[in-house]
Amino acid sequence: MRRLLLAPALAAALIAGPAVSEPPDPGAEPLVINGCRIEPATNCSYAKLERANLKGANLEDASFHGAVLTGADLREANLQGVDFQVGNLSKADLRNAHLAGAHLFGNDMRGAQVQGADLRRVNLQDAKLDAANLEGADLTGAILGNVRLDGATWTDGRVCAAGSAGVCR
């Protein structure tokens, strides 16, 4: 009897196939987290977005000046040209994110996961990247003046020595 009750449900699931998420409706309202609209060119300066799930978000040319995104999930997000100056991205997950031309001057990125990220032409002047993982990231043309790199994993997999600033030693 039990098999007969489960068989129709199993058959229906097999016919329907795996769940597929629909693409976002272009006319839909953008996601809002703590008053911050998650969309390109938004102004979320000084926003509190700790542990926010922004995976794959398009935030191109947005302002997050002074914002706190500690532990946020920004994997594969489009962050090109974003202003993250004097913000906090510590322990954030930025794997494979697109940050070309972003402004990260003075940002706290300690312990961030930045593997495979596009960091071309990024301004990291005075940023704190202690214990961050930059393996496989593209830093072509990046400004690295006075960047703290104590214990960071460099693009080639080397671990930077204590006192590394601007250059992984």
Image (cartoon, helix red, strand yellow):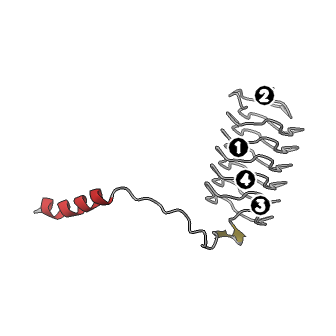
Looking at the rendered structure, the secondary structure element under dot 1 is loop
What is the spatial separation of the Cα atoms under label 2 and label 3, in whole angstroms?
34 Å
Report the residue marked by disc 1: 111
Q: Secondary structure at mark 2?
A: loop
Q: What whole-number distance in Å separates the C-alpha atoms at marks 3 and 4?
A: 8 Å
The image quadrant where one finds the C terminus is top right
Q: CA distance from mark 3 to mark 1?
A: 23 Å
Out of 71 and 157, give the one closest to the viewer. Answer: 157
- 13 to the left or right of 146: left
Q: Secondary structure at mark 3?
A: loop
The residue singled out by tag 4 in the image is 79
- Residue 58, horizontal then vertical, whole percent: 67, 58
| Number of the label disc, if any, that sits on residue 62 | 3
CA distance separating discs 1 and 2: 15 Å
User: Could you classify mark 1 by the number of other residues whose Cα lies within 10 Å: few (under 14), some (14-19), or many (20 or more)?
Assistant: many
Instruction: Please tell me which of labels 3 and 1 falls first in the chain.
Output: 3
For residue 130, which quarter of the picture? top right
Comparing labels 3 and 1, the label whose residue is closer to the camera: 3
Q: Is residue 34 left or right of residue 122?
A: left
Circles 3 and 1, Cβ within 8 Å, touching? The answer is: no
Q: Earlier in the sequence, mark 2 or mark 3?
A: 3
Label 3 sits on what residue type? Ala
Q: Are marks 2 and 3 in contact (CB under 8 Å)?
A: no
The reply to whether callout 2 and callout 4 are in contact (CB within 8 Å) is no
Circles 3 and 4, Cβ within 8 Å, touching? The answer is yes
Percent from the top left, x then y, of residue 62? 77, 60
